[in-house]
Image (spheres, rainbow, N blue to C red):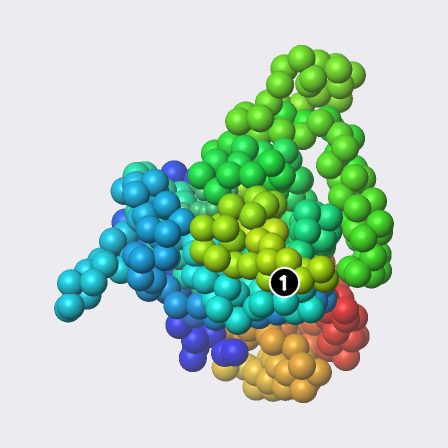
């Protein structure tokens, strides 16, 4: 993309109403525009990152055999009456009437809709196990929408639902989700720690929240510092292998790590003092196993091997797709702007032309741009007639992890400069080597 042809409405000044750094930077980098409280337009560069995050979520879900689909945003109140949640949900639910006076709602989550669907189509244990998911907009009329996309009213969520014959299989689905989530967040450059959580209105005994540590997080968390040394890495996992999933689950959940809702001081005090940490975190996901409650209320029954009709064991599993943009920026920025991890960066690298209009510089930038693009990479070429300082400031603000700087002086010696956004270190090299370096960085990302 050439910046002169793009739509990137950056702001020089800090927006007065944005309290936390991710919100400020998303506004300043021209990623989002508020349309009303807690509701945002996703401007092209914000939308690009949102899609990248969504794609990682899809890839990791499908790697585990979970099946993508799409349910509507608007739902009928009837199913929510059956589950008993129509009244229980309270004012967070946006209720709407259609022209025939039928009660509708904008879905805050989808347990009812999907359980009803499965009740309609699944009648035998032979169709199990089954995990369906979608990535869809949700609406929750939050009392205090704030912090930009972190606590929106309209937000994008991946929500998945497992349907199993018995508790053992459903707990395997739970563990499988825990494993997929670990890899999902790591691919986004994030450390998200699974913490024992409170099951809240969905109910059930098993639930973990995934928290990204950040001072601006809304949850208070208590954990054993050993947990931050763990990483999932690129281990290959057979998702059908119950024992393998269980052992990863145990590895990542056996140390003390809890939110304030489940915190127990006495237990925490058993962690050696030098490892006890009290901090704040951003909830970027949550997994649940809740048994047969919804299946019973909504009639999701199957015939088991003995011919008996039994209710399905279910769980639901959510990732805050749009909140993740804020969480990633909270975890990765400096005074000059965002620092995107390679896995989610909107463009793979920036090309800065120090002297737009200089024949040699223009030609070298065009050639770099074409070669990178031909390799399947996605560069952002700042081809504006701007001063170098302004171009650098824009690149730092929008946070592309790599910048190639091209100027007449370097070109006389046959070199361009490659700079890491994270370390600020620069290296001179030929344009060919610069291309090879960027290509190598993104191999396998
Ligand atoms: P919170 O405690 O932050 O209100 P929740 O526990 O009610 O969230 P879940 O029902 O677990 O949310 O939804 C799954 C994920 O969706 C959350 O882990 C979070 O990342 C995201 N999410 C929830 N509410 C919002 C919101 N208002 N804005 C953006 N993302 C949200
Ligand atoms: Mg939650």
Left or right, 84 with respect to 284, comes to left
Disc 1 C-beta below 8 A from ligand 1 = no
State the residue at coordinates (63%, 33%). 196
Percent x, y of residue 269: 70, 14
User: Residue 274 is drawn in which quadrant?
Assistant: top right
State the residue at coordinates (77%, 33%). 254
Mark 1, residue position? 303
State the SS at label 1: strand
- Of 235 and 115, which appears nearest the observer? 115
Q: Is residue 363 above or below residue 246?
A: below
Q: Is residue 328 above or below residue 208?
A: below
Q: Is residue 422 visible?
A: no
Q: Is residue 214 above or below residue 270?
A: below
Percent x, y of residue 13: 36, 49
User: Residue 360 is drawn in which quadrant?
Assistant: bottom right
- Of 348 and 118, which appears nearest the observer? 118
- Of 310 and 208, which appears nearest the observer? 310
State the residue at coordinates (84%, 51%). 244
Q: Is residue 436 visible?
A: yes
- Of 379 and 177, which appears nearest the observer? 177
Percent x, y of residue 198: 54, 33
Q: How many marks?
A: 1
Where does the C terminus fall, quadrant-wise? Answer: bottom right
State the residue at coordinates (33%, 51%). 81
Percent x, y of residue 44: 43, 70
Q: Residues within 10 Å of mark 1 (few under 14, many from 20)?
A: some
Q: Is residue 17 above or below residue 409?
A: above
């Amino acid at each position: 993309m050439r910046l002169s042809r793009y739509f990137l409405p950056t702001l020089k000044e800090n927006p007065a109403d944005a309290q936390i750094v991710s919100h400020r930077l998303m506004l300043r980098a021209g990623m989002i525009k508020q349309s009303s409280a807690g509701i945002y337009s996703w401007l092209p560069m914000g939308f690009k990152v949102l899609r990248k995050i969504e794609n990682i979520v899809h890839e990791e879900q499908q790697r585990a055999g979970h099946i993508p689909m799409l349910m509507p945003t608007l739902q009928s109140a009837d199913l929510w009456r059956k589950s008993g949640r129509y009244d229980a949900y309270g004012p967070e639910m946006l209720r709407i009437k259609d022209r025939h006076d039928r009660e509708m709602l904008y879905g805050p989550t989808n347990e009812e809709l999907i359980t009803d669907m499965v009740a309609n189509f699944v009648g035998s244990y032979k169709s199990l196990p089954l995990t369906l998911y979608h990535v869809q907009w949700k609406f929750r009329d939050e009392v205090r929408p704030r912090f930009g996309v972190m606590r929106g009213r309209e937000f994008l969520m991946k929500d998945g639902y497992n349907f199993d014959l018995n508790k053992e299989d459903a707990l395997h689905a739970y563990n499988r989700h825990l494993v997929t989530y670990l890899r999902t967040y790591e691919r986004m450059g994030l450390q998200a720690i699974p913490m024992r959580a409170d099951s809240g209105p969905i109910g059930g005994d098993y639930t973990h929240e995934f928290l990204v540590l950040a001072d601006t997080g809304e949850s208070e968390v208590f954990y054993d510092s050993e947990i931050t040394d763990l990483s999932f890495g690129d281990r290959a996992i057979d998702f059908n292998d119950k024992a393998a999933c269980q052992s990863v689950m145990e590895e990542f959940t056996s140390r003390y790590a809890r939110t304030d809702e489940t915190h127990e001081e006495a237990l925490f005090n058993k962690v050696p003092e030098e490892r006890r940490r009290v901090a704040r975190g951003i909830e970027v996901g949550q997994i649940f196993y809740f048994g047969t409650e919804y299946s019973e209320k909504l009639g999701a029954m199957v015939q088991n091997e003995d011919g008996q009709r039994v209710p399905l064991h279910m769980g639901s599993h959510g990732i805050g797709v749009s909140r993740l943009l804020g969480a990633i920026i909270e975890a990765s920025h400096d005074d000059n702007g965002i620092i995107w991890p390679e896995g989610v960066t909107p463009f793979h690298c920036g090309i800065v032309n120090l002297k737009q209009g200089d024949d040699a510089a223009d030609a070298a930038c065009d050639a770099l741009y074409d070669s990178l693009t031909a390799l399947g990479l996605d560069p952002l070429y700042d081809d504006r007639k701007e001063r170098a300082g302004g171009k650098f400031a824009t690149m730092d603000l929008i946070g592309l992890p790599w910048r190639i700087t091209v100027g007449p002086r370097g070109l006389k010696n046959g070199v361009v400069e490659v700079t890491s956004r994270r370390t600020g270190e620069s290296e001179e090299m030929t344009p060919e080597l610069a291309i090879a370096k960027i290509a190598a960085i993104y191999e396998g990302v």
